[in-house]
């Protein structure tokens, strides 16, 4: 059994050093954090620890510096945001191991918060170097894993270190796992999964695993055209992964064999020239010279109805090319339908899907927005994630 954050809080943490792996991999522009969603998501964990008098030492990665110092990828901008959000001073070092770190940790007072430097400045991190993990562990009494976005990695700060210290999940990680486990194991039914995005190849494992648990599966986005092609329907110049037609056919067979409800869009926004939204038409079936860029109005209403009659809805993947305003209506309408769903628990995962929910301005009306893109998908594929299994 994984040791949860509640288990950790049963210990007396006053004066104890707790190393917390967070995911502060946030977008930064001109020295400023431009989206602090991930910082906010770990505040609960940090505050619960400082409330108990723990000395909190934070580890995070930022981008992919490739095992060396990259000035533009220091965590300093993150420190400034964290400090504002916490409403207490946060110390930040320019290293993550070494004498300066040791000294700073020894000087910490109860409830202080210290942020170490970007852990991926050290090549030992991604190599899951055991000595590196041991060095980090030597600074602390407990380890807390709260970086849901990084638990699919077997790195020193996501894996190795948990073998060197008493290790627990953080509040955010527990919340992520509660919601996603609910989708896979014990959803309030009916459970509807809405899956879109560009490439069916990147979502096939998720589709197949979710198919076992869902009552209704709604598909949208470009991946639909590979399935329609498998059904011998006209897909025009839409994005199709031809090498996946056979897999698509057997997926459709599996849906039928399991007796699940599959909803494919019944109309489309189709263009003859992708870069000219003036060529857009609403059609039920594409012409050979048209490309499908969004779901049409009938599909939007139908999906809304399916959402309203569900008790749990999981959404991953935009239903159209939402980056282009003229092709964004399907995605934003579904975001609003989820926000207005009265009886459903709503869970959203995936980088672009979250961006869409934020752009639609309805993020705080979802029950759960997963902070882990790749990690949430791997979890829903049914894979065991190293950073989580190591906590057991
Ligand atoms: P997520 O990050 O939420 O998992 P994906 O990365 O799988 O989502 O897919 C997002 C991308 O899918 C977006 O960039 C969007 O433009 C693209 N997309 C959605 N529908 C279509 C379509 N019909 N044709 C081409 N691209 C599409
Ligand atoms: Mg994406």
Image (tube, grey):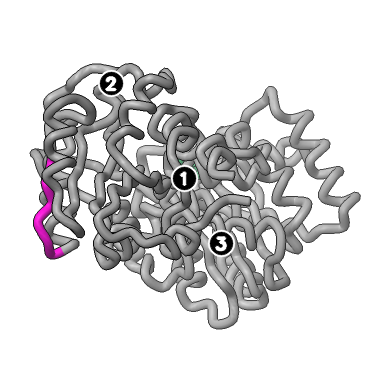
Which residue is depicted at the point 18% across and 38% down?
A: 75
Tell me the mark number nearer the camera, choosing from 1 and 2.
1
Q: Is residue 346 left or right of residue 81?
A: right
Which residue carries the number 1 mark? 167
Which residue is depicted at the point 27% across and 57% down?
A: 54
Which sits earlier in the primary sequence, circle 1 or circle 2?
A: 2
Quarter of the image containing the C terminus? top right
Binning the other alpha carbons within 10 Å of mark 3 as few (below 14), some (14 to 19) or many (20 upward) gives: many
Which residue carries the number 2 mark? 122
In three-dimensional space, the C-alpha distance between marks 1 and 3, rounded to whole angstroms, equals 21 Å
Which sits earlier in the primary sequence, circle 2 or circle 3?
A: 2
Tell whether label 2 touches label 1 (CB within 8 Å).
no
Q: Is residue 140 visible?
A: yes
Secondary element at image label 2: loop
Which residue carries the number 3 mark? 179
Q: Nearer the viewer, residue 57 or 356?
A: 57
Tell whether label 3 touches label 2 (CB within 8 Å).
no
Q: Nearer the viewer, residue 341 or 84?
A: 84
- Please give the range of residues in magenta: 87-92
Secondary element at image label 3: helix
Q: Position of residue 7 (x, y in %)?
A: 49, 60
């Amino acid at each position: 059994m994984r040791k949860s954050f509640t288990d950790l809080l049963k210990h007396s943490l006053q004066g104890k050093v707790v190393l917390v792996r967070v995911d502060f991999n946030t977008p930064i522009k001109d020295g400023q954090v431009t989206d602090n969603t991930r910082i906010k998501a770990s505040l609960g964990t940090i505050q619960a620890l400082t409330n108990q008098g723990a000395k909190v030492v934070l580890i995070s990665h930022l981008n992919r510096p490739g095992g060396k110092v990259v000035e533009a990828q220091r965590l300093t901008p993150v420190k400034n945001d964290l400090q504002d959000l916490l409403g207490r001073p946060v110390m930040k070092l320019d290293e993550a191991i070494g004498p300066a770190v040791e000294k700073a940790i020894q000087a910490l007072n109860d409830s202080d918060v210290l942020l170490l430097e970007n852990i991926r400045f050290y090549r030992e991190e991604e190599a899951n170097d055991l000595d590196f993990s041991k060095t980090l562990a030597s600074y602390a009494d407990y380890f807390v894993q709260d970086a849901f976005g990084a638990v699919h990695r077997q790195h020193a700060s996501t894996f190795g270190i948990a073998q060197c210290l008493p290790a627990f999940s953080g509040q955010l990680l527990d919340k992520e796992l509660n919601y996603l486990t609910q989708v896979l194991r014990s959803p309030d039914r009916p459970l509807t999964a809405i899956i879109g995005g560009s490439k069916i190849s990147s979502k096939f494992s998720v589709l197949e695993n979710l198919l076992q648990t869902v009552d209704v599966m709604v598909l949208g986005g470009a991946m639909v055209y590979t399935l329609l092609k498998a059904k011998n329907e006209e897909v025009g110049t839409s994005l199709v992964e031809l090498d996946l037609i056979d897999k698509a056919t057997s997926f459709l067979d599996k849906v039928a064999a399991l007796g699940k409800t599959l909803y494919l869009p019944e109309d489309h926004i189709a263009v003859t020239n992708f870069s000219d939204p003036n060529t857009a038409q609403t059609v039920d079936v594409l012409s050979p010279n048209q490309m499908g860029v969004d779901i049409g109005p009938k599909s939007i209403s139908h999906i809304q109805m399916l959402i309203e009659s569900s008790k749990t809805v999981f959404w991953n993947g935009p239903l159209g090319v939402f980056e282009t305003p003229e092709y964004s209506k399907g995605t934003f309408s579904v975001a609003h339908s989820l926000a207005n769903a009265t009886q459903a628990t709503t869970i959203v995962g995936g980088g672009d899907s979250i961006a869409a929910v934020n752009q639609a301005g309805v993020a705080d009306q979802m029950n759960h927005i997963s902070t882990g893109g790749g990690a949430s998908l791997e979890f829903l594929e049914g894979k065991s994630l190293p950073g989580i299994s190591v906590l057991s």
